[in-house]
């Protein structure tokens, strides 16, 4: 079951019909615009339905359902290396788009958009994010240990697309074997440096990583490109290496299945579209006291209401929590202890923003830089009054974006 909305931007458009036979790696839905990506079959089989199905967002959204062929060896639709050195940069970026790549750290932002450097801008440095800072998750760690060749090929391709002069790979210093493996395998002709980082949350956020590695600050309301940097997740880079190495588009991803509520915690390579219930069954099933299943980590993950939702491009982890970790909390008034101010990595005032959000004063929140909030959840975690600050901030930012979109439409 492959949702057409697995990325930020416009949903993909099906190019197959019910009853068609498809092969693993074959294009089944095309991009519907610049900020959109194609979708490929993750298994050989027959299209059994194109209809609305449960989506991890909580909605019912359009998806392509493939009835897998149990007799198929599940080989790729087209195999063999892809020439990335000869094509000019615009064609190379289009080739990356054709592979269906998005950010695999969770945001699922289309990779080709990030690599399309506008006129007047430049990307001097390419920063690879190997700082897997969410508790429980080990996805990026395993990728760094097992896909080093693909990572460095993906770096070469990306540096050509950006015109970057040097690459840095930021890795937290609790992953010593990953740092050693990457450092040992860096090609001698590749300008790449491994940067060990302090293990802390949210080290893996783009702006935090840029500050830690390059000692550069991205201005408020700006993008990393404004600091002449482009950041990409290590999984995305490895996936691009697989694509240009053997023509495998984004049809599978590494996922950590973990937590006290799963019987056999594992890090798995899972075809996109696999049902969550099947993944949990493969790992021995849930324990009797499991109360919540998240896509992602405990700080920024989203709770799933239905175990029939599919693994998607942005699913970095499946976290199963028991009653001991998921307890009902009573919210109390803010005591102005300033713990949230100390915890905020971008130096906002979560206490004041939370009071404004509760009273619906969203325009005032904009003046206090609510749009700079990265929704890391640190403020909610440390709040002794159990105020759901980050949840209120997400709603407030969504309402402000809707307001801006309506204003833009009215002006047009």
Image (spheres, rainbow, N blue to C red):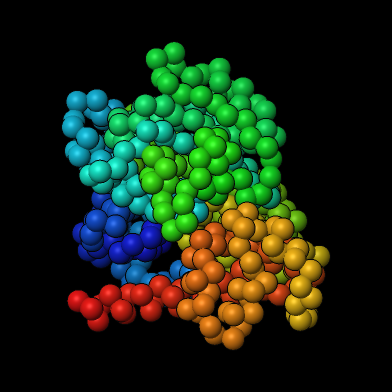
| Name of the residue lying farthest toward the front | 367
Image position, residue 65 (x, y; %)? 36, 63
Image position, residue 325 (x, y; %)? 77, 64
Q: Residue at x 50, y 40 (%)?
A: 216
Taking the image as shown, residue 122 lies to the left or right of residue 329, namely left
Total numbered labels placed on residues in the image: 0
Which quadrant: the C terminus? bottom left
Taking the image as shown, residue 233 lies to the left or right of residue 243, namely right
The answer to whether any part of residue 258 appears in the image is: yes
Image quarter for residue 158? top left
- 37 up-or-down from 78: above or below: below
Of residues 395 and 185, the one nearer the viewer is 395
Image quarter for residue 72? top left
Image position, residue 340 (x, y; %)? 71, 64
Image position, residue 246 (x, y; %)? 33, 31
| Name of the residue lying farthest toward the top | 188
Image quarter for residue 198? top right
The answer to whether any part of residue 178 appears in the image is: no
Of residues 128 and 31, the one nearer the viewer is 128
Q: Residue at x 31, y 68 (%)?
A: 50
- 44 up-or-down from 175: above or below: below
Taking the image as shown, residue 112 lies to the left or right of residue 336, namely left
């Amino acid at each position: 079951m492959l949702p057409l909305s697995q990325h930020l931007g416009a949903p993909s458009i099906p190019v197959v019909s019910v009853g068609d036979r498809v092969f693993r790696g074959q294009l089944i839905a095309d991009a519907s615009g610049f900020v959109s990506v194609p979708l490929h079959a993750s298994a050989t089989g027959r299209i059994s339905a194109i209809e609305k199905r449960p989506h991890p967002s909580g909605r019912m959204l359009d998806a392509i359902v493939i009835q897998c062929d149990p007799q198929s060896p599940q080989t790729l639709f087209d195999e063999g290396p892809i020439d990335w050195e000869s094509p000019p940069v615009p064609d190379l970026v289009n080739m990356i788009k054709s592979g269906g790549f998005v950010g695999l750290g969770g945001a699922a932002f289309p990779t080709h958009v990030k690599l399309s450097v506008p006129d007047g801008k430049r990307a001097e440095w390419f920063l690879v994010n190997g700082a897997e800072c969410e508790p429980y998750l080990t996805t990026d760690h395993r990728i760094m240990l097992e896909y080093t060749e693909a990572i460095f090929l993906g770096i070469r391709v990306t540096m050509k697309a950006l015109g970057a002069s040097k690459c840095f790979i930021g890795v937290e210093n609790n992953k010593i074997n990953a740092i050693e493996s990457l450092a040992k395998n860096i090609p001698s002709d590749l300008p790449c440096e491994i940067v060990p980082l302090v293990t802390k949350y949210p080290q893996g956020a783009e702006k935090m990583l840029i500050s830690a590695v390059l000692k550069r600050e991205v201005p408020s309301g700006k993008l990393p490109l404004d600091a002449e940097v482009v950041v990409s997740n290590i999984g995305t880079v490895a996936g691009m290496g697989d694509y240009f190495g053997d023509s495998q588009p984004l049809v599978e991803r590494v996922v950590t299945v973990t937590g006290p509520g799963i019987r056999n915690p594992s890090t798995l390579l899972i075809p996109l579209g696999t049902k969550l219930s099947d993944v949990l069954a493969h790992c021995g099933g849930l324990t009797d006291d499991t109360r919540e299943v998240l896509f992602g980590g405990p700080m920024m993950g989203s709770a799933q209401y239905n175990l029939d939702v599919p693994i998607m491009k942005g699913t970095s982890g499946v976290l199963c929590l028991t009653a001991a970790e998921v307890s009902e909390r009573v919210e109390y008034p803010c005591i102005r202890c300033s713990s949230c101010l100390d915890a905020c990595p971008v130096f906002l005032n979560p206490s004041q923003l939370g009071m404004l959000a509760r009273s619906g004063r969203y325009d005032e929140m904009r003046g206090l830089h609510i749009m700079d909030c990265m929704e890391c959840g640190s403020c909610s975690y440390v709040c002794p009054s159990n105020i759901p600050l980050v949840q209120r901030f997400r709603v407030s930012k969504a309402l402000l974006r809707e307001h801006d979109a309506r204003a833009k439409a009215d002006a047009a």
